Amino acid sequence: MYFKTMPLFRAFAAAALMGAAGIAGAGPIPAFEYAEATLANQPSRNVMLGYSFMVAAPTVVTSLAYFSGSGASSHQVGLWDADKRLLASDTVLASDPLSGHYRYHAIDAITLAPGQLYYVAGLSLGNLFAYSPTEIAMAPGIKFMANSYSGATTSLQFPQLSFAPEGGPYIGGSFGVNAVAVPEPGAITLVLTGLGMIGLMACHRRKKH
């Protein structure tokens, strides 16, 4: 069966727009979202589920995430580099903020370097999972590389197995990135234009009096 989302990734788009406008405290931008996916009709084994990816520019990761439709209360999620070094890990809780298909748990920010391969995956705990997502949306500058998963495990571990399907990532672990803190040039232009108009109106009023 299909697990559906809100139209046009409202949470993804809203976070991205607020980040582009330089709004402080806009929250993490989802690294990955989708329109709908096939929900497995039976629980998975206790495995690691996620994906590998690359970034085009220095990227600040501020949260780890896990698929909200799993039916579990919490999941451990980890982020590794290509040398299998664990860069960040934490437990995503049922009480963590929900955005789209994922719950996001804040972590101490880490910066990913461009041109490097990274892996993110979460422990399924034998709960429901989804696959074959449609209308995939990656955050700007993030490129999906392959599905990543592990054999049966009872603890957080590097996802040793990978393959690159047409359908996109396994729906398990993911992450959120920092919103842009500095306004884009277009946003600055709009603000300056508005201030200029206010100034002209004030001068005009003073001349009339």
Image: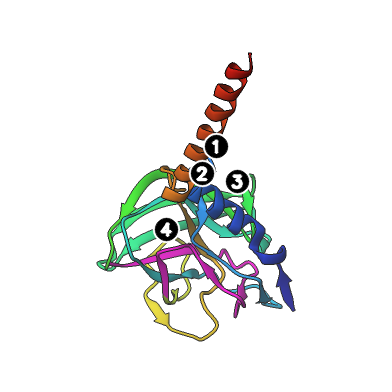
Q: Is residue 79 left or right of residue 41?
A: left
Q: Please report the residue visible at 51 percent of the width from the left and 46 percent of the height from the top.
A: 21
Q: Please report the residue visible at 40 percent of the width from the left and 80 percent of the height from the top.
A: 162
Q: Element under label 1?
A: helix
Q: Is residue 40 left or right of residue 149?
A: right
Q: Nearer the viewer, residue 87 or 155?
A: 87
Identify the mark nearer the N-term, 2 or 3.
Answer: 3
Identify the mark nearer the N-term, 4 or 1.
Answer: 4
Q: Which residue is mark 1?
A: 194
Q: Position of residue 22 (x, y in %)?
A: 48, 43
Three-letter amino acid code of the residue under disc 3: Asp
Q: Nearer the viewer, residue 92 or 29?
A: 29
Numbered badge on residue 190: 2
Q: Please report the residue visible at 60 percent of the width from the left and 74 percent of the height from the top.
A: 44
Q: CA distance from mark 3 to mark 1?
A: 38 Å
- Stretch in magenta: 116-144
Does the rendering let one see residue 70?
A: no
Q: Which residue is mark 3?
A: 96
